[in-house]
Image (cartoon, rainbow, N blue to C red):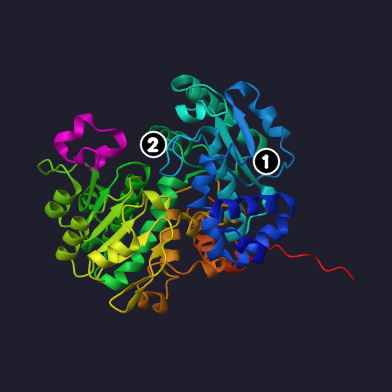
Amino acid sequence: MHNLRQYEVPLQRYMAMMDLQERNERLFYKLLIDNVEELLPVVYTPTVGEACQKYGSIFRRPQGLYISLKEKGKILEVLKNWPESNIQVIVVTDGERILGLGDLGCQGMGIPVGKLSLYTALGGLRPSACLPVTIDVGTNNEKLLNDEFYIGLRQRRATGQEYAELLEEFMTAVKKNYGEKVLVQFEDFANHNAFELLEKYSPTHLVFNDDIQGTASVVLAGLLAALKLVGGALADHRFLFLGAGEAGTGIAELIALEISKQTKAPLEETRKKIWLVDSKGLIVSSRKESLQHFKKPWAHDHEPVKGLLDAVKAIKPSVLIGSSGVGKTFTKEVVEAMASINEKPLILALSNPTSQSECTAEEAYTWSKGRAIFASGSPFDPVEYNRKVFVPGQANNAYIFPGFGLGLIMSGAIRVHDDMLLAASEALAAQVKQEHFDKGLIYPPFSNIRNISANIAAKVAAKAYELGLASRLPRPKDLVKYAESCMYSPVYRSYR
């Protein structure tokens, strides 16, 4: 740690950590687990974003498995080349929408590698059971196509049938090679593909899209916890989103499901408490014809509204959620409008990395005169305002997916069900204690993350058993203890 701290530049710390992972995996995980709050921003957002942008020029040794269009027809063979045969989790990307940074082609490999190191550090999966995959179908990023250090195919992205066939072959090969219970986590696919892949493979594979479902689950947990600070039930609040892509619509749907579960009202009704703004303004019914299919459920009756500020004034939300991938969009006027409508406005700026965040923690607290309850996707330092210290929470998917995956794997689940996501959210919200609320936090600190993951895993596994989707029988009596016993710990064996 002393040596790592000598590096001023985060990217150098990232490279040092990657070198360590290559050289001494056990020590890498020991460091990451013992210093999770300090090192999480290095191996994950925001630093991993910069690493993906420069992946070609910092490339030393390949990590993970690359499957390109050239391997079409031979994907099963390629999978068999991977030295480990007992794989429990695959994180796969095609690099088309990396964080809020856009198309980074196969340099997106940094994301599956980073996510899986968190599966091990935070969720206790064995490193050898994790397989990072990047599907290289080309890139539309001109800068990368002309970059002498770009490591992928130098061609425009394959789309349509060619793309669908490659993914179909991949998903079939994965099931054939690793069985029914391997978890495939989709990561950073572009919107249109993300929804289609999740819809297509949910009925037949154990699949999870972290951008749609993981983000939704972690945000819902923050909202459930925040109710203790702002009062009322989830159904009493109005929600306004900036950004109607994977994250926005995924979060919105899970909130609607949770309200529906609590109030027994039909989903069509509970969706009406939630409004979304996209690049063309508020999503309303008069726009229905031209909307992409995943936005249609959110088109409610209202006259057209152009910008976010006007939408805030018209809808009067108590919760404002940013998932736009565009920085600096929660302006002073927007935050002030939220503060004039609500005693304690709840403001979540979720876009990553930090440069794309809708506003900073300092802006949220200052512009709301210290009344906002704020959380963000990338980490911000504590803020002092009027001699009071505010600690911003981080709505980080790393709270959910490692425990969620562990719960699926330890129960031998064969499918993911929305009720499991709700169970994970409720389990995370239950981990926020009074001392955290006193600092204005709506998420627990990461220092206790393995214990949090074990609790989430237990709740997810319990739901899998309840729904009849678990294949590991008999059901263990104490699921939290069982989760802890399943977790990999990076210790050296003592020899006599």
- Residue found at the very far left of the displayed protein: 303
Tell me, yes or no, if residue 184 can be seen here: no
Q: Of tags 2 and 1, which is closer to the observer?
A: 1
Q: Secondary structure at mark 2?
A: helix
Give the residue drawn at x 67%, y 48%.
Answer: 129
What is the number of the mark on residue 191? 2
Between residue 430 and residue 49, name the one nearer to us. 49
Q: Is residue 290 above or below residue 350?
A: above
Q: Amino acid at mark 1?
A: Arg
Q: Which residue is at 21% across, 61% downward?
A: 318
Which range of residues does the magenta coloring cover?
A: 278-298
- Quadrant assignment for the C terminus: bottom right
**Quarter occupied by residue 345:** bottom left
For the residues marked 2 and 1, what is the alpha-carbon distance in whole angstroms?
31 Å
**Sooner in the amino-acid sequence: mark 2 or mark 1:** 1
- Residue occupied by mark 1: 60
Query: Considering the numbered disc 1 on the image, is that residue within a helix, a strand or a loop?
Result: loop
Rendering coords of residue 198 (x, y %): 44, 38
Q: Is residue 250 left or right of residue 455?
A: left
Q: Position of residue 1 (x, y in %)?
A: 65, 65
